[in-house]
Amino acid sequence: VQLQAFGGGLVQPGGSLRLSCAASGFTFSRYIMGWFRQSPGNSLEFVSTISASGDSADYADSVKGRFNIYRDNAKNMVYLQMNSLKPEDTAVYFCAAKWYNGVSIYAARSSEYGHWGQGTQVTVSS
């Protein structure tokens, strides 16, 4: 199982970035995907999650209305479109995968995810 997140960078407040996560080594369409972030001195924070089919998603209150998660199961990719970025969005962003066991269609707790990517840095600053 391999997850590789990319697309981070430096952006001004109010700007946009799209993060991508490439998955390989497993049946992507059978996994719930999530995005988490961690800033210096803080614990890992839930950002967004999407169901295995891509039909349902959930967001942290802090990003709701600004971020959009979606996936392309044909390409084994999951994306996080981030708009109206704020300095407090600055963090290392991680994608993660969780086997869909037929119970919860998505997951917001990091402990539920068994596979993690390496992270990509997002810095929001003027």
Image (cartoon, grey):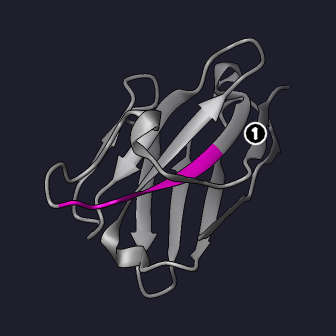
Tell me residue 90's x, y (percent). 72, 28
> Regarding mark 1 in the picture, which secondary structure is present there?
strand
Residue name at image x 43 percent, y 75 percent: 28
Furthest residue toward bottom: 74
Q: Quadrant of the N terminus?
A: bottom right
- Residue 8: in magenta span: no
Disc 1 residue crowd, few under 14, some 14–19, many 20+, Cα 10 Å: many
Q: Is residue 1 visible?
A: yes
Q: Nearer the viewer, residue 112 or 66?
A: 112
Nearer to me, 4 or 61 = 4
Residue located beneath label 1 in the image: 122
72 relative to 62, above or below: below
| Image quadrant where residue 51 sits | bottom left
Amino acid type of the residue tagged 1 in the rendering:
Val
Q: Main secondary structure of the magenta part?
A: strand
**Number of disc labels:** 1
Q: Is residue 84 in view from this perspective?
A: no
Quadrant location of residue 108? top left
Q: Residue furthest left?
A: 103
Residue at 78%, 18% (x, y): give it: 40
Compared across the picture, whether 97 is left or right of 83 comes to left
In-image side of 95 versus 66 (left or right): right
> Is 65 rendered above or below residue 105?
above
- Residue nearer the viewer, 33 or 9: 33
Q: Quadrant of the C terminus?
A: top right
Can you give x and y, in whole percent of width and height, for residue 85 in the image? 63, 33
Residue 44 position within the rendered picture, expressed as x and y whole percent measured from the top left: 59, 26
Rendered location of residue 20, percent (x, y): 62, 63
- What span is colored magenta in the figure? 94-101
Looking at this rendering, what residue extends furthest in the top direction? 41
Task: Name the residue rendered at 45%, 47% in the picture.
Answer: 113
Residue for point 56% across, 42% down: 83
